[in-house]
Image: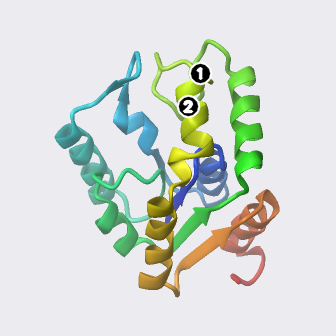
Amino acid sequence: MKIAVLGYSGAGKSTLARQMSRRLAIPCLHLDQVHWLPGWVERNREESRQMVQDFLDRNSSWVIDGSYPALCCEQRLEQADRIVILALPRLQCLWRAWRRSVQYRGRARADMTEGCPEKFDREFLRWLLWEGRSKARREVFRDISRRWPEKTVFCRSSRQAAALTEQLAGNGPIE
């Protein structure tokens, strides 16, 4: 099973990917860990792309969370058996991101590069509420669902994401 998890910031991509990885006993790659070096420094794009390519080459099953179009996105989506797009409401994503910032204040969460402490600043707030939800970004998600309708699932609530995890683990039909 190969699962690509996409969606808005704060929607729970990393959490869902980690849960699916555990339930299905398959490796998980968090693209935030690939993209960021300690201190919130961006890794060289070619090095990041090669890290993702190596992961894809080494693993016959996987869960990968994050969009990052430059990081083998076309290949990931083409290979994926299931594409999950987390499209939770804006205010729910804001709440989840704020709660996460409180929980991990001053330290990096497990799915982020060590040395990148959780933060919640104006720049991130602007991204969460407006820039990360641009019309162009919504259109990218629609294009993905039009291109691969048979394997794309939109989850618009945490409950739907949890149900999908159970279905993929063999505990129910995939809807």
Q: Residue furthest left?
A: 46
Q: Identify the image quadrant of residue 37.
A: top left
Helix, strand or loop status at disc 1: loop
Q: Identify the image quadrant of residue 89.
A: bottom right
Tell me whether circle 1 and circle 2 mark residues in contact (CB < 8 Å): yes
175 relative to 80, above or below: below
Left or right of 136, for residue 46 = left
Q: Can residue 2 be seen in this view?
A: no
In the rendered image, residue 95, in percent from the top left (x then y), is placed at 77, 38
Q: Which amino acid does label 1 sit on?
A: Lys
42 relative to 169, above or below: above
Give the residue pinned by disc 2.
124
In the rendered image, residue 45, in percent from the top left (x then y), is placed at 22, 40
Which quarter shows the C terminus? bottom right
Helix, strand or loop status at disc 2: helix
Give the residue pinned by disc 1.
119
Residue at 62% x, 12% y is: 106
